Amino acid sequence: MKLFKKVAFLLAAFMVLANPIACAAEAVEAEVTEVQEELYSNWAIPALNDATKTGIDYLLGDENLKAQITAEQLKQLTDNLKTKIDGEKLAADKSNKSIEIVGEVNTRENVLNAIFNIVSKYDTNAPKGEGVVEYLVEKGVLLGDENGQRLEDVATVEEAIILADRALTKLFKEKGVAAKGLFWKVENKGNTVYMLGSIHLANSTLYPIRQEVIDAFESSDELFLEVVMDNPEGIAYLQSKQLYEEGKTLKDDIGEELFAGLAEIFTQIGLDEESLGQLKPWAVYLSLASLSAQVQGETEGPTTQITGQHGIDMHFLDKANDMDMHVDELESYQFQADLFDNVPVETYIELFQQTIDNIAKAAENPEAFAEESKEAAEAFPKMLKAWKDGDRKAMAEILASASDDPLNQVIFGQRDKNMADGIEKLLNSDEKKTYFVIVGAGHLAPENSATGYLTEKGFKVENLNIN
């Protein structure tokens, strides 16, 4: 039982907190998506990316967003908005009356009225009838002066999505329910380094993010990540490194019986035995960890599935690219791939065997297994909640569950010290710049992580979290 918990926690920690390797393929896919100009306008891409992160565009994002919005699509959008707000259990002002929708339901004015009818219930200062447009202009939901508001025009899908997302973001930030993140600040020699702990695979529960984090990012000169995830050369190296050279297979390393057990798992998700056999143990482990995160994070509705595109580092990489901000890395895909490639195969064999044994236990007695594995199954959702709440201690406690495992020293250990050294170089730079550093939350939240090493080096690390 103890070993099972350790494996489950390691799967979550490895994939969600410490390693963005699995996001590589999604980074390439994102580049392809951005050139599909016929589906949406170039000007809208940054705002639509934000809306995808919050989940406001649920069931709408894959359609022609330049088209005029239909009544059915507007209802879906307002349902998404209401569901997202309801998830925060905000106190509603029942005295606020809804604005009557008159005429064509899909005009820009009526889209605004529909959005207002939802968000105004949570604002005691909202107008009780007249002044809806002025209110939404003041809130920053509707931009431009009277000449540019085009209230009588029919709204496009992309316009409606963006308006709804702005309203949601404004409301969440005013009510203090925007995700707080795990956030630190260090200053030295005229340089400022903001450090944000990332969850590399996430969903829409982590969005929108509090304004203090956004302001710090937008004031920064450079973004530093563990790896630059949309680097084609790094991705190519990663993809080649995870495959065996001709003449050797996974079966040779882990044995026929264990390979057969893994093959049974992977054939159910569309990976045949021949393809599985080409993967090295660490690449297989990555796939298992990704599956674990997705299963633990399964949701319906605007709370989206777990993806790399919803990862915190990918979110800010998108923003940096939109702003033409310089992006650099503390590590590299080559470093990370080599690191995990050098882990003894015996370590992975133990983890694979335990995974297969637990699947057998679950099949034999599902109810008993679900009960005994409940704590481990909740690890990933707890990580998401700790990040959203800005609860450093809770995150550190979750990570401590796997702290005595040998693989943990590979995931963290020396890497934390290396990251602290890299951040120290930024702090000692003569550039007098502001840097925004994003690494896995596991490298920052525990006291014996990169933040602790920076403190030992004599830097004053300002904790901007709730604890």
Image: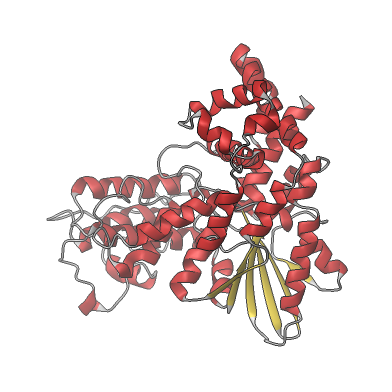
Labels in figure, total: 0
Looking at the image, residue 173 lies above or below residue 400: below
Image quadrant occupied by the C terminus:
bottom right
Residue 167 in sight from this viewpoint: no
Of the pair 266 and 84, the residue shown nearer to us: 266
Of the pair 379 and 19, the residue shown nearer to us: 19
* Residue 342 coordinates in the image, percent (x, y): 74, 47
Colour scheme shown? secondary structure
> What residue is shown at x 19% (from left), y 54% (from top)?
101
Image quadrant occupied by the N terminus:
top right
With 97 as the anchor, is 124 left or right in this view? right
* Residue 89 coordinates in the image, percent (x, y): 50, 45
> What residue is shown at x 19% (from left), y 68% (from top)?
151
Q: Residue furthest left?
A: 103
> What residue is shown at x 77% (from left), y 62% (from top)?
450
Quadrant for residue 169, please give it. Answer: bottom left
With 263 as the anchor, is 255 left or right in this view? right
* Residue 373 coordinates in the image, percent (x, y): 68, 26
Looking at the image, residue 88 lies above or below residue 266: below
> What residue is shown at x 66% (from left), y 71% (from top)?
194
Quadrant for residue 417, please give it. Answer: bottom right
Looking at the image, residue 239 lies above or below residue 430: above
Looking at the image, residue 112 lies above or below residue 16: below
* Residue 310 coordinates in the image, percent (x, y): 50, 52
With 417 as the anchor, is 201 left or right in this view? left
Residue 263 in sight from this viewpoint: yes
